[in-house]
Image: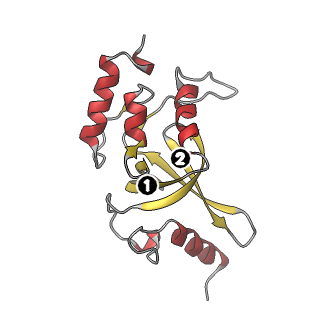
Amino acid sequence: LQTKKQHIQNIFFKTFSSHHNPLIPIQMVSKIDPTQRKKGLVKGLPHADTIIFQGPPGRDGIPLEKTLKLNSVNAPRLGDAERADEPFAFAAREFLRKKLVGNKVNFYVENKFNDKEYGRIMIDDKDDVATMLLEQGLAKLNEDVKSKPYNFSEYKEAYEKAQKHHRGIFSS
C-alpha cells in the first residue's frame, strides 16, 4: 500500500512527466537528460530566474508545486522588509511574468543540486526564457558552474550582446 505522501508524489510526478512517454515519472529517471522535455503550467515567479509550476490538486485539494531555477542565470533579487530591490529586479520579473504566468511551457531539467532543480524553459519550443532575459540585460550569466547549460554558447552570445549594447543592468 502507498502512503499518502507517495500517492501525492506519484500524481505530481506524472503531471510533470516526459513528453515522449507521459507514463514515466520524473522520480524514476535515474540520469538527468537535458533533452527530455516536460510540460508545465507556470504559477508564478518569485524572482526572474526562479519559476514555480502548478501541478494537480492533492488529496487535500491544494495544488502541488514544482520550482525550477534557470541554469547558470542569475537575475537581480527583489527586496524585502530589510533590503531594497536590486537594480532591474522588478523589470526582469515583470518581463517574464507577462510571458509566462498562466501559460503552459516546456521545460528541461539539466541539473540537481541540494534538492534544487536547474534547467531551461522554452516558450512554444522556440524561445528560450534565459536567452530572452540575457539579451535584455535583465540577468547575468554565471560562467563558473561545473555543468554548463545545454545551450551555453547561445546564453553567452546573448549576454555579451547585452553588455555591448549597454542594456538593462549594463546601462550604467
Q: Is residue 122 above or below residue 65?
A: above
Element under label 2? strand
Q: Is residue 65 left or right of residue 164?
A: right
Does the rendering let one see residue 143?
no
Nearer the observer, 13 or 158: 158
| Distance between mark 2 and mark 1 Cα atoms | 10 Å
> N-terminal of the two: label 2 or label 1?
2
Q: Position of residue 19 (x, y in %)?
A: 41, 67
Residue depicted at x 43% and y 41%? 129
Q: Is residue 24 left or right of residue 45?
A: left
Q: Residue furthest bottom?
A: 1
Q: Residue furthest top?
A: 172
Q: Are marks 2 and 1 in contact (CB under 8 Å)?
A: yes
Residue type at tag 2: Ile
Label 1: which residue? 107
Nearer the observer, 116 or 64: 64
Residue type at tag 1: Phe
Residue depicted at x 47% and y 46%? 69
Q: Quadrant of the image for the N terminus?
A: bottom right
Label 2: which residue? 51
Does the rendering let one see residue 17?
yes
Q: Position of residue 50 (x, y in %)?
A: 51, 43
